[in-house]
Image (cartoon, rainbow, N blue to C red):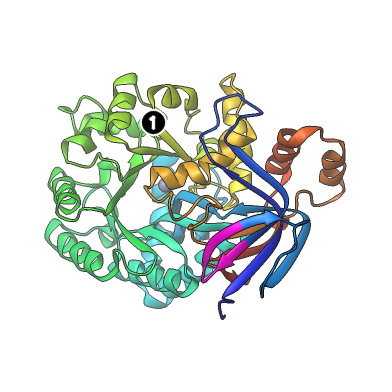
């Protein structure tokens, strides 16, 4: 596909200029620009103007009257090989790993499986309106190469790294400290900072890494400023008990990572359900983020994330599908599930807090807010066009909705990948296959 040098997209532009407050259905940080042109040159946003003002100059124009134009979504925690086990019946986290996940990941030892899987996964993300993601491939070094190669072909912003596991996992999925350190170093040198790709030191979770491997992961983070760190944290009660048994000297689950040098402002912790106030303070002080994964938490029965407590402590919260624990790559479905999780806690999640967490909030937590997550001048033109209502039920609800928040909340609650009209990545329109 070729990049048109000057591209103009017409529709209703929506993004954020500030963090919306909890419960506020009309916050100042919502930037709503109905019927505007969004202007793109050489893959970057260069401006916006009302459609009623004559658009001067030579632009390749695409008109989407009445449709939403948003920044592409950012999924901050998702497992590429687990598309193969999405919607698997009958288990909680630890059994789920053994029964479904590890066999699926073991298949990625085969080059052809890893190659085809990476392409299928990234195309599926795009087809759901997600243009940036923080991804777990597998323990196999080549799974990372295939994922990054496929992301580069699509121009996508992907953060990923080889999974580290050296105990409490099947032998064919275990590495060792020396080999893993060598492979990670090679991968960081090959991929980190190339195109739109970034490396994340990727610890599956504390129980599957020895103290020596955790210490090695900490060394990698210290030695390579700018790399990310991703792992799971306090997802499930049996898991938390196991961590306490394996690391009796640690004050908490988070403390295991902190003690290994794995807690800083580039750390992405999936879940973070079973935390206490001291953990939340430590996360906030470090500038780390929680990748809240509501669909997965509901599906595996892991627990109800306390978003208010995280927010009150100043912890950044982003949104994540966590497929295959989660049951959809759609960030709209994920937001709808996040609303339900908060409802079960007696709280209400506005469409604004949810949308912000999947766009600018996630970008800021990743220190990438100059690049993704908004329609600001200078940002990459990672942009999606959405139908606000698909099907008779949603259309009737849309017709009856009063005010912007009500309309957007109905879209978020009823929408999915069928609502996606088009996706541009760095100004290039991608096929939705
Ligand atoms: Zn996960």
Judging depth in this view, the residue of 33 and 407 nearest the camera is 33
Question: For mark 1, what is the residue?
Answer: 315
Q: Label the magenta part by its dominant secondary structure.
A: strand
For numbered disc 1, what is the local secondary structure? Answer: loop
Work out whether residue 206 can be spotted: yes
Q: Is residue 42 magenta?
A: yes
Is 43 rendered above or below residue 257? below
Residue 87 drawn at (x, y percent)? 57, 50
Farthest-out residue, bottom: 2
* 357 lies left or right of 34: left
Quarter of the N terminus within the rendering: bottom right
Residue 250 % position (x, y): 18, 28
**Quick check: 165 above or below 426?**
above
The question of residue 217 being in magenta is answered with no
Q: Quadrant of the C terminus?
A: bottom right
**Residue toward you, 275 or 159:** 159
Question: Is 295 left or right of 387, judged from the image as shown?
Answer: left
Residue 319 shows in the view: no
In the depicted structure, whether residue 89 falls above or below residue 159: above
Within the image, what quadrant is residue 28 found in?
top right
Q: Which residues, given as a range, are shown in magenta?
A: 39-47
At which x and y percent is residue 338? 57, 35
């Amino acid at each position: 596909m070729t990049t048109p040098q000057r591209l103009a997209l017409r529709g209703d532009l929506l993004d954020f200029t500030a963090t919306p407050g909890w419960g506020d259905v009309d916050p100042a940080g919502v930037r709503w620009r109905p019927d505007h042109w969004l202007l793109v040159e050489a893959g970057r946003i260069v401006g916006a103007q009302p459609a009623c003002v004559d658009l001067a100059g030579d632009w390749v124009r695409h008109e989407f009257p009445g449709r939403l134009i948003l920044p592409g979504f950012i999924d901050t925690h998702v497992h590429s090989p687990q598309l193969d086990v999405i919607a698997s019946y009958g288990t909680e986290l630890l059994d789920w790993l053994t029964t479904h996940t590890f066999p699926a990941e073991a298949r990625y030892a085969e080059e052809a499986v890893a190659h085809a899987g990476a392409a299928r996964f990234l195309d599926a993300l795009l087809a759901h309106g997600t243009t940036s993601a923080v991804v777990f491939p597998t323990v196999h070094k080549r799974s990372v190469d295939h994922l990054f190669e496929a992301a580069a072909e699509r121009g996508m912003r992907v953060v990923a790294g080889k999974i580290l596991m050296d105990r409490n996992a099947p032998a064919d999925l275990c590495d060792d400290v020396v080999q893993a350190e060598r492979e990670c170093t090679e991968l960081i040198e090959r991929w980190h900072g190339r195109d739109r790709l970034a490396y994340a030191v990727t610890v599956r979770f504390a129980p599957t890494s020895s103290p020596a491997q955790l210490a090695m992961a900490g060394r990698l983070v210290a030695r390579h400023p700018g790399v990310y760190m991703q792992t799971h944290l306090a997802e499930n009660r049996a898991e938390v008990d196991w961590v306490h048994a394996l690391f009796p000297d640690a004050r908490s689950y988070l403390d295991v990572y902190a003690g290994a040098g794995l807690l800083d402002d580039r750390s992405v912790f999936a879940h973070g359900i079973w935390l206490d106030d001291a953990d939340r303070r430590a996360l906030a002080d470090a500038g780390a983020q929680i990748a809240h994964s509501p669909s997965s938490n509901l599906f595996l029965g892991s627990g109800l994330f306390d978003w208010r407590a995280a927010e009150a402590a100043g912890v950044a919260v982003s949104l994540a599908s966590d497929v295959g624990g989660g049951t959809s790559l759609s960030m709209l479905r994920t937001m709808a599930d996040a609303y339900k999780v908060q409802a079960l806690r007696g709280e209400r999640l506005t469409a604004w807090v949810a949308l912000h967490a999947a766009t600018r909030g996630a970008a800021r937590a990743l220190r990438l807010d100059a690049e993704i997550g908004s329609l600001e001048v200078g940002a990459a033109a990672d942009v999606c066009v959405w139908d606000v209502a698909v099907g008779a039920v949603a259309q009737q609800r849309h017709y009856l909705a009063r005010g912007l928040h009500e309309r957007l909340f109905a879209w978020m609650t009823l929408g999915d990948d069928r609502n996606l009209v088009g996706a541009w990545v760095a100004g290039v329109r991608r096929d939705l296959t």
